[in-house]
Amino acid sequence: MARYIVRRLLQAIPLLFIISILIFVLLQSSGDPLASMGGKRLTRPEDRARLTRIMGLDQPIYMQYIYWLFGNTWVQIDVDNDGTPDMYGQRKGIFRGDFGDSLVNRGQPALDIILERLPNTLLLMIPAEIIILFFSLVIGIYSSLRQYSLTDQIITAGSFIGYSMPIFFVALASMYIFAVNFRKWGLPYLPTVGMFDPKIGKTFSQVAMHMVLPIVSMSLVSISGYSRFVRSQMLEVISQDYIRTAYAKGLSERMVLMGHALKNAAIPFVTLVGIDIPFLLGGAVVTETIFGWPGMGRLFIDHLNRFDTPVVMGILMLISLAVVIFQLITDIVYSWLDPRIRYT
Amino acid sequence: MNQKSIYKILALIMVASFILTACGSSQPSAEKVITIAWTQEPNTLNRSYSSMWYMAVLTDIYSCWPWVFNQDNEPQPSLLTDLPTVSSDGLVITMKLRDDIVWSDGEPITSVDFVFTHEMITSPNNTVDSTYPHDKITISAPDAQTVVMTFDEPFVSWMTSTWLGTLMPKHILQPVFDSEGTIDNAAWNMAPTVGCGPFNFTSWESGSTMRFDKNPNYWGPEAKLDAVVFQFVPDDAAQTAACLAGDADICFWPPYEDIPAFRDAGLNVMTEPSGYTEGWFFNFRDMASPGIKDVNVRKAIAMGLNREANADLRLGVVPVTETFWDAIPTYVDPSIVPYQYDPEAAKALLEANGYVDTDNDGIREDKDGNPLRITQGNTDKTERQSYQALAQQQMKEIGIDLVTYSYNSDILFGSFSDGGPAAVGDLDIMQWSDVPYFPDPDTSYWLCSDIPSDENPYGYNYFGCDETLDALFQQQIVEIDPDARQKIFWEITKYMHDNVLYLGIWDDGDVWIVNPLLTGVKFSGVNPFFNIMEWDKTE
C-alpha cells in the first residue's frame, strides 16, 4: 500500500504541471486585466503601457509562465520605456513559495488573499457537506426500505422538485421568504446577507444565524440528488443473496442494513463524495455571491472576471492538488469498504 | 430507521432553529452605526492604486481632499483656506493650507505631505494605477502651508483630476519607501489606520465588511455617527433584499425594476447626476462598415431608436441624454435639437440616400447591393443586453440589421495587439457608460493621437480621427478663459451631434436608496459622501 501511495503521489507531479500550463495559457489568452482595472472608465494608454511593462504582461506567455514558476528577480524592467532599466522584478515564483502578487489587489500576495478566505469557505462547506451526507443517507435508506410507500412517493416527488430548482432560485426565494417577508410579517426571521450583522459584531450566534440560509439552499439541491442515488444503490444491494443470508443467520435488521447493505451500497457513493470534497475548497460560487458570504467561490469569480492570473491560478492549483489527494484517499477507502480490493 | 426516529430528527432541527433564532436576535449596541451595502469590494484603500469607482468614493470617509464638490458639484475648500489661485497664464496654481489640519494620529498635515504624495505617484518604483496628471506637474512647497503646482502649458481640468483623495501621510509611508524602495506593499495601502477624514479606518475583512469609526482628531465638524460599515453584497437582488429587510441602511445603484419596491417599503430613493452617460459611440474608422461611415445612416439610427421608451422602462428615474456632456449642460450648445423618435423620417432618409430593400427580406441594401448590416457591442451587463434586444427590434423596423455582441469588459476593451474588438474596429457601434473629467468637460477619447495601432496598442480612441474635432479638443484643454472654453465645447457638442459621432441613451447618474431614519444625507456626483459627518440616525 505504501508503495502504491508513493507511486500515485509521484504521478501527480507531472499531472499538476500539465494542469498548471493549461490553466495559465487559458487565463493569459482570455482578457486584459489592465483594460479598465475594474473602473468605470478606460485606462489611459500611457498607464496601461507602463503597468504592462512593470507586471511583465508584455512578455510572451511562455516567459510569463516561467516567471510564475521561477520568479523574475533576475530580470531588469524598464518602467518608463526610456531604454534604461529602472528596477529588478520582484516575483520569486511558486518554487520559492511565491504565487505572485494579485494584479487586482496590487502588492498583496495571491496566497495571502486565498488563505484569508479559505477558513470562511470551510466554515460554510464542511457543515453543509455533513448535512448533505447525513440527510442523503437517512432519506435514501428510509426511502429504499419503504419502496413505493406513500412516504417514498412523497420523498421522490420532493427530490425531483428540489433537484430541478436552480440554486440561485432556491437561495433568493429562501432569502425573500425567511429574511424579508418573515420580518415584515412579524415572525422570527433570518438575516439576508453577510457573515454577521455589523451592528452586533462577529459573534458565534451571529455567524451561525448567517450560515442557515446558505447551507439550507446548498443542501436542498444536493440532498435531492444524492438521496436518489443512495436509494437506488440500497435497493440493488438489499435484493442480493448475501443480505437474505444475513437475515437467515438471525442478524438484527440494523446489523444487516448498517453492517452489510450500507457498506456495499456505499462504494459508488464514496466515489461521488471523493470527487465532491476537493471542491469544497473552491467554495460555492452562486451561494456565496447571493448571500455575500466571504468565501473562495466569490473570490474566484471576482478575480476571474478581472483576469487576475496569480489569484485564479492559486485557487485552481489548490483545488487540483486537493483532487489528487482526495482521489487517493477515496481509493484507500475502497479497500476498507471492500476487502477484495487490493493495491500493489 | 423508523418513522419515529425521523420525527425525532425533524423535531430536533426545529428546536435548534428556534434556539439559533433566539441567540441571533441579540440587540445591537447603542452606538450609531450605519451599514451600507456595497456591490463591489475595493481592491485597496490607497486611491493612487485603484481605478475603481467603488474605492474612490470611500476616500471622502477616511481621507481628505484639498477641495470637495458639494451637492451642486461646485468645489468648496476643504484642507485649504480658500480655493487655489491660478496665475494669469494658467501655469501656476497655488494652494494655501489651513493651519489646523491634522492626521488622525495628531501629526499636522503640511505641504510636505503633498510633495511626498506627488513623488510617490510619479516614482517609477510604484505601480500606481495612473500617474495622470502628476506627470504634467512640477510641485514645490515654499512653506509648510503653501503648495505650488506648475504646469508646462495650461491644463484647465486640474481641479477635477488632481488630489482626488490621494493624499498620503509622509510620516507613515516615507520609512516604508526608504526601506523597501516602493510603497506597493505598504500595510497602509490596505489598512490606512492613519487618515484625515471624519472617520478612521478600523477593519477590513476580505469579502465581508469594512468598518470606519469616528475620528476623534478630525479637524472638521465632528461626525454624528459612531461608525460606518460597508457590507460587500455582490448580488443586486441580495442587495435589494438587504435594504428591504433593513439589514442595510443604504444601497447603491439597485436594479431600476426594484425601485417601486423600495418606495412601497418607505425607503428614500435619491438620484444625483454623476456625469456618467450611457451612450452609443460610433466607429468611423476605415475598417468600419460602409453604412456606419455614412452620416445619413447614423442620423437614421438616431431617429429610429426609441430612447424615450427605454427611459420609461427605467421608471423615469433616468432621463434620455443626447450628448456626452448632458450632465454639465453649460457646455452643451443650446441650439442642439435632440433627435426625436421618428421611424418614418428615418426610413425616408435611408430611402433618399439609396438604401432600399431590393430583395424584400426586411433589410435594406446599399447601392452596391450590400445589406445594411451594422455591428453593435457592449459589456455583458444585463441591462445593456436587454437594451440590445430592444434596439435590434427598432433598427429592424427601419430596415437595418443590427448584429449585437456582448463581452466581458476586459475582453471588449482588450488592446489592439490582443485583438480587443473595440480596439481593432470590429464593432460599428460601441455602448457603455462614460464620463468626462466631471464636472470638468475635458476628455481625450476622440484625440487622433489615441487611435489604436501596432505602434499604439493601448490607444483608446476606438472611434476615428476627425481633424476638426481633434483640433477643438486640443484647443479646449489649454484655453484658460472660461467663456472661450465654453464656446469651444458648444462647437464640439454641435459638431458631434450633427455628425452623430456619439448618441446619448440615458443619464447614468447615481441612484441611492436611503433608510428614512437617516437624516442630513446629501450626495454629490463627485464626492458622494462629502457631508457624511453631518449624517445622523434617529431611532
Image (tube, coloured by chain):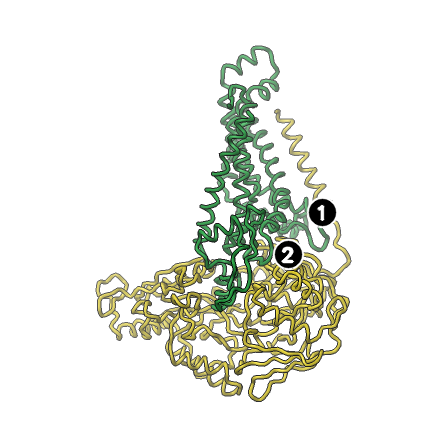
Chain colours: A green, B yellow
Between the C-alphas of marks 2 and 1, the distance is 18 Å
Closer to us: A4 or A165: A4
**Position above or below: A182 against B399:** above
**Position above or below: B52 against B209:** below
Badge number at residue B24: 1
Task: Report x, y in % for residue A110.
Answer: 58, 51
Quadrant of the rendering where the C terminus of chain B is positioned = bottom right
**Which residue, as the protein is rendered here, is positioned at the far bottom?**
B88
**Direction from residue A32 to residue A293 in the image, left or right:** right
**Direction from residue A125 to residue B473 in the image, left or right:** left
Closer to us: B507 or B127: B127
Circle nearer the viewer, 2 or 1: 2
State yes or no: discs 2 and 1 in contact (Cβ < 8 Å): no
Q: Label 2 amino acid? A: Gln
Q: Secondary structure at mark 2?
A: strand
Closer to us: B538 or A212: A212
Badge number at residue B192: none
Q: Residue at x 57, y 29 (%)?
A: A137
The number of callouts visible is 2
**Position above or below: A218 against B422:** above
Q: Label 1 amino acid? A: Gly
**Direction from residue A62 to residue A119 in the image, left or right:** right
Task: Report x, y in % for residue B323.
Answer: 45, 75
Within the image, what quadrant is residue B365 found in? bottom left
Which of pointers 2 and 1 lies earlier in the amino acid sequence?
1
Q: Which residue is mark 2?
A: B231
- Local crowd size for mark 2, using a 10 Å CA cut-off: few (<14), some (14–19), many (≥20): many
Is residue A240 visible from the viewing direction of this image? yes
Within the image, what quadrant is residue B363 found in? bottom left
